Each structure stands twice: as C-alpha cells, then as structure tokens.
Image: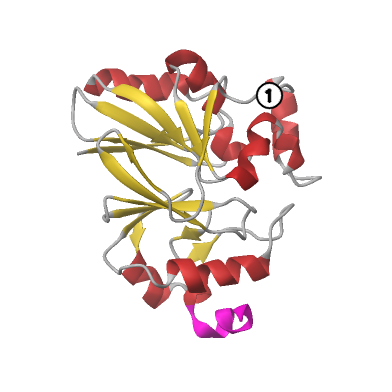
Amino acid sequence: MILEVIRAQYFATNCWIFASGKNSECFIVDPGMMIPDMVGPISEVITRHNLKPIATVVTHGHLDHTFSVRPLDSRYGLATYIHPKDREFLGNPFGILTPGGPTIPILQEMGVSDFAEPSDIRELTDEVSIEIAGFTLKALHAPGHTPGSTVFIVNDEHLISGDVLFQNSIGNTTQRLGSETAMKKTLRNVILPLDDELIVLPGHGAETTIGRERKNNAYLQERYLRSAD
C-alpha cells in the first residue's frame, strides 16, 4: 500500500494520498492551501508512483482542507466526497470563516476571492460505506468542529480524523459554526467506541492510534466528557 502525506504551506494541513500500490488508482484527502495550490506537489506523488487519481475525500468544509479541491478537479476530473452539511462551503468558504481569523488576510495576500464547487460532488452521510481505489471507506458523521465534520475508517486499519481528533488534542470548537457540546458527543459516541488498533491520520500533526489517545488525550477522559449527556 502507498500512503503519503503532504503538509500544506498554510496551517500545515495534512493531505493524505492513498493507493493500493504503484500503477493503481488513488484518492486524495483534504488538499489544502498553497501558492498557487497543491496540484503541483500532489501531481509529483501521482507521477512518481504512476497513479490514477479518481476521488478527493473531504473531512470538513474549512478552507485549509478544501482550497485545492477545485484545482485538482480541473486537472484530473475527480469525484469529491463530503458531508451534505459542509457541502455549501466548497463553493462559499466565507460562510464558515471566523471573522477576524487568519484565513482572509492570507486569501488577500494570495489574490484569491472567487470559489466554485467542483464538477462532481457526492454527499456522504453517517455510516455510509463506499469503495474507492480498492479501499473501503466508512463515513462517520462527527460534528463539533464544523456541522458536517466526518471521519473515515479505511479498511478497518486507519481513521482519517480530519480536525476531530489530533495527537493529545482535538479540533477547535470556538470557530464559526463550531460547537463544544456537539464535539463532546462526537468524542463519546463516535471516537471512543473505535478499536484501539486504528491508526489515526489527523488533519494536522503526527499520526497516533485510538488506543494511545484513549489513554493520553485529556479530551477523551470522563472529566471533560461528562457534560456531553
């Protein structure tokens, strides 16, 4: 299996690329913000392994995870998978940007103001499983960071956690449309029941496992979660 990560220039977002091996199909997770976009570095990986990209999987609608979705679609003609509650932010990312946050000044610096949806959007709801590039992905709706945040179990081996779960931390819930109450319910009802052996591929930072986070992550402890019920 090929599993590569490219960290975006802005916000160090992890863009994951999955393929079963060389000369095979692949899918791309959360292509974020670079100048001019992430098509160049992603294409380098695709060319190096002679891959055929067929889909982009988006964990949530924040621009640091979606900025390069449309440029990739323009280059390769990809299906784009996202939860319906965050779909609108593919074409209108300003609808979820926190006023006074760091993203708008970066967009101004980059000279970017117009966005549009990619050509082929496929909405994924809770507990739907799909086959992409030889992998089985199970979508689990995991709101809190955003209304449509979704994590994906890949072949019962990896968890693409987006900005829901990090090593020793979780995603911010104070941004626009975030909800700490929803996040606590997600952590209790979606994350904690997962198998300890799952390798967590987060939206930012280093890989971890569910077992390690169950033991060490303060946000998965009862003293934080007790107000979730």
Residue at 59% over, 58% down: 143
Q: Which residues are magenta?
A: 221-229
Taking the image as shown, residue 47 lies to the left or right of residue 123, namely left
Residue at 37% over, 19% down: 43
Most foreground residue, 51 or 134:
134
**Residue at the outermost top position:** 75
Dot 1: element: loop
**Quadrant containing the C terminus in the rendered view:** bottom right
Which x, y percent locates residue 104?
74, 35
Q: Residues within 10 Å of mark 1 (few under 14, many from 20)?
A: some
Whether residue 225 appears in magenta in the rendering, the answer is yes
Residue at 73% over, 43% down: 97
Taking the image as shown, residue 193 lies to the left or right of residue 188, namely left
Most foreground residue, 107 or 153:
153
Q: Main secondary structure of the magenta part?
A: helix
Whether residue 14 appears in magenta in the rendering, the answer is no
Taking the image as shown, residue 220 lies to the left or right of residue 213, namely right
Taking the image as shown, residue 60 lies to the left or right of residue 190, namely right
Which x, y percent locates residue 190?
47, 66
Q: Which residue is mark 1?
A: 115
Question: Is residue 61 in view from this perspective?
Answer: no
In this rendering, the answer to whether 91 lies above or below 155 is above
Identity, as a three-letter code, of the amino acid under mark 1 = Phe
Question: Is residue 129 in view from this perspective?
Answer: yes
**Residue at the outermost right position:** 99
In this rendering, the answer to whether 124 lies above or below 77 is below
Residue at 62% over, 26% down: 117
**Quadrant containing the N terminus in the rendered view:** top left
